[in-house]
Amino acid sequence: MNNKVLLFNPRSANSKHRVPNSILQVGASIHGVHEFAFVDGNLERDPWAVIEGYLATGAFRYFACTVMPGPQLREAIPFSKKIRERFPDIITIWGGYFASNQYKVVMNSGYVDFVVYGPGDRAFPALLKALETEAPYEVIPNLIWKTPEGDIIRNSKEALLDQDALPQLPFDTLDSFYPMRRYLNPTFMGKRTLAYHSSVGCPFKCSFCAVVPIYEARWRGKSAENIYRDIRYVKDTWGADSIEFHDNNFFVSEKRTVAFSKRMLGENMQWWGEGRIDTIDQYSDESLALMRRAGCRMIFFGAETGNDDLLKQMDKGGRQTGEQIRRFAARMKQFDIIPEYSFVLGMPGDSEEQVWAQIESDIDFIRQIKAINPATEIIIYIYSPVPTEGSELYERITRAGFRFPETLEDWLSPQWESFDLRRNPLTPWLTPAMVRRIRDFESVLNARFPTVSDIRISGAQRRVLRALGALRYNSGFFHFPYEIRALQKFWLRYRQPEIEGM
Ligand code: B12
């Protein structure tokens, strides 16, 4: 039968290879029902040649591609286009965050036939079944399709599935395409770090976040027991010694975190995950101490800003405050868990002066945090809007003249790519001088406090960098830090978690 599925993970960051959890989980949903092949752009020198080789066999009918914004588009777009030209009978299906949030531009491209928005665990096998049996698409939840008249239809969203009822992740199948060992790479936590995803969604509605339009404040997680089972399997079979949890919000349930931590005691594995300050601040001291003993080394938090009005506008649940962010940094120090605080600078304001004032006060706030707990890792993003249509923030940015690209190819332009990387947005309220100010501060900060997550920098290099950064950091003179940049670029090839990170 010529109905095999090609599951493709386009190349993302070059620096580190991680388990391609998106296609792994989509593969799980059809395991045993459909034959499929994995192609991982991160591990292929010429992924197009591999894809072409598979499709030329005539055994495949479906090209299923996961797409997040930024670098993955560089392969997802041209490859899907070439497939349409060279293999017009292949049905192309996209899923993932970019496809879900920007589905109109994707569906209008002319070379993507279906988008699965949000979880694909039920939608994907249901779509394949409908295509095999020529059944209607209307009843398939989370599916976006086009009528013969060209209307784009977005079917209803299904409730989040019980994550423990999902099929097992097919690690062995992945291993038969790409040895699992190649996905277990050194990080600051260990020699063979596993990337694992244990929950979907997030119960909050931050107005700047790409997760909100898809999950609408819903969250469901696997049980501690099931997470532990998978981790032990990868540890026992391929030697994983540490874990990066890729959940949007790993720590939603204190009960689950505690149950997981209890299982991890004695495993000698360090781990990292993303959480919320206001949630984890509610955890008891016993829970935090247990987590540390169980290997929790660092937690990523969206601190965003120290400005309480802005925090409200960002809709951080109305609970997180500047004061709490400061206090919590000190609390984490007490438990020896490194807080990794991410900040979003460059939010829209009513006037240029206001935007400037906010940038300066955020810089000042970050300095306060560093003084309270110098181990705090700081990640600086420049605000990049997501289409949270209907939100006050989205209306505000639209009024300010912000527009998303109108064709899929436009997303490939260098400006839009750095937009996706949250580095240099095309947001009209930010002047180049503001972007420069943020970047200059960031360079000096990164020199004064080199990130612990860069395992390539030696002790001596750290000392030189710190000394150089201290001069500027202490005097508050951030302009044109050319000497630091040259050092970071040529001597250290400095790792920037905000680009290579999530
Ligand atoms: C791992 C990850 C990465 C890895 C990619 C590793 C890899 N293997 O390729 C790395 C670290 C490289 C990365 C980079 C970036 N990432 Co990233 N990343 C993630 C993260 C944490 C997990 C993705 C994942 O594996 N999820 C697990 C799987 C099981 O879930 P899923 O992808 O949602 O898949 C389900 C559905 O979406 C759907 N589905 C997905 N794909 C497909 C495909 C088909 C065909 C079908 C039918 C269904 C389907 O079905 C799946 C099962 O239900 C997500 C956040 C998250 N928790 O999901 C962010 C996330 C996707 N990343 C994001 C961003 C912005 C980036 C960057 C572009 C920017 C940045 N600065 O972080 C960079 C690019 C940098 C670069 N140089 O490449 C954003 C996207 C936001 C948006 N605007 O849409 C997210 C949502 C994080 C966030 N909260 O902001 N990332």
Image: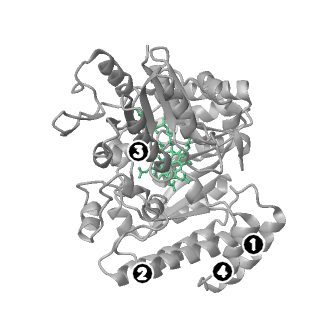
- Quadrant for residue 471, please give it: bottom right
Label 3 Cα neighbours within 10 Å, binned few <14 / some 14-19 / many ≥20: many
Q: Distance between the residues labelled 4 and 3?
A: 36 Å
Q: Residues within 10 Å of mark 2 (few under 14, many from 20)?
A: some
Mark whose residue sits in front, 4 or 1:
4
Q: Name the residue under label 1.
A: 465
Amino acid type indicated by mark 1? Leu
Q: Is mark 2 on a helix, strand or loop?
A: helix
Q: Relative to residue 456, is residue 235 depicted above or below?
A: above
Kindly report the distance in space between the C-alpha atoms of the residues bearing marks 1 and 3: 37 Å
| Labelled disc at residue 97 | 3
Q: Which of marks 4 and 3 is nearer the N terminus?
A: 3
The residues tagged by marks 2 and 4 sit, at their Cα atoms, a distance apart of 23 Å
Of the residues under marks 1 and 2, which one precedes in the sequence? 2
Label 4 CB sits under 8 Å from any ligand 1 atom: no
Q: Which of marks 2 and 4 is nearer the N terminus?
A: 2
Q: In this view, does 66 lie to the left or right of 152?
A: right
Labelled disc at residue 482: 4
| Amino acid beneath label 4 | Tyr
Mark positioned earlier in the residue sequence (4 or 1): 1
Image quarter of residue 452: bottom right
Q: What element carries label 1?
A: helix
The residue labelled by disc 2 is 356
> Can residue 471 be seen here?
yes
Report helix, strand or loop for mark 3: helix
**Do the numbered discs 2 and 4 sit on residues whose CB atoms are within 8 Å?**
no
